[in-house]
Amino acid sequence: MSEHEGEKPANEETEGAGEDLIFPEEEAGKELTDLEKAHAERDRMRDQLLRIAADFDNFRKRSRKEIEEVRRRTVEDTLREVLPIVDNLERAADAMSGATEVSAVTEGVHMVLRGFEDIASRLGLKRVATVGQQFDPTCHDAMQQKETNEHPPGTIVSEVVPGYYLGERLLRPAMVVVAKPPAKTEDPGASQA
C-alpha cells in the first residue's frame, strides 16, 4: 500500500461532484421561472380584484336603485292614503260657502279628522301625549312657560302644535307651554313691620 492508502484517487473525488454544482445559467433559468410565476400570480390577483371591484360597484348601483324605488313606492302609497282626506276637505270647503248651519260644517270637518286618524293609525302614526303630562325633552319642545299655581312646575298646560311618533320613532316633537311657579313678589307691608 502506498502512503496515501486511505485517500481516494483524484478522478474519484470529482466523479459525481458535477451533479451538485449549479451553473449560473441554470440558476437564472430557475429564478426566471419563479419570477414568471410571481408575475402570473400578480396578474391573476389584479384581475380578481378588478372583477370584485366591478361587482361591488354594480351591487352599489343596484342597491341605490332599489332604495329609490322603495322610497318612491312608500311616498305613492302614503299619498294614496291621504288623498281621500284632501278630497273630503275640498268638499267641506265647498259646503261652507253655501252652508247656513255651522254645525253641519263642523260635523263634516270632524268626520275628515276621524278619517285622518284612521289612516294615521294604519300607518303607525300616533300623537305625542301632552296636556297634563310632565314635560319630556325627548318628545316635547317647550315654546314658552306659564306662571301658575294650578299645575305643578314642569307640567304641560297647553299644546301649541301636536307631535307625532311613527312607530317608536319620534317624527315631530310636540310644541307645548309648560307650567312654572309664579315669581315671588315681596309684600310691601311685611318689609315695613
Image (cartoon, rainbow, N blue to C red):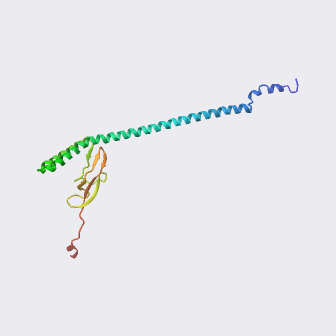
Q: How many numbered discs?
A: 0
> Can the viewer see residue 109 in this picture?
no
When asked about the image quadrant of residue 187, the answer is: bottom left
Place of residue 14 in the rendered image (x, y in percent of width and height, measured from the top left): 80, 27
The residue sitting at the top extreme is: 1
Among all residues in the image, which is located at the extreme bottom? Answer: 192
Residue at x 81%, y 25% (from the top left corner): 12
Instruction: Point out the residue furthest to the right here.
Output: 2
Residue 99 in picture, x, y percent from top left: 13, 49
Residue 14 seen in this snapshot: yes
Q: For this view, does 110 lie left or right of residue 33?
A: left
Q: Quadrant of the N terminus?
A: top right
Toward the viewer: 53 or 92?
A: 92
Residue 172 percent location from the top left of the image: 30, 50
Q: Is residue 16 left or right of residue 92?
A: right
User: What residue appears at the point 30 percent right and 48 percent down from the top-left corner?
Assistant: 171
Quadrant housing residue 38: top right
For residue 133, side relative to residue 27 (left or right): left
- Residue lying at 27% horizontally and 40% vertically, measured from the top left: 80
Residue 81: x and y, percent? 26, 41
Q: Nearer the viewer, residue 107 or 159?
A: 107
Q: Residue at x 15, y 48 (%)?
A: 105
Q: Quadrant of residue 184?
A: bottom left
For this rendering, which residue is in front, 8 or 88?
A: 88
Task: Residue lying at the far left in this picture: please name it.
Answer: 100
**Figure quadrant of the C terminus:** bottom left
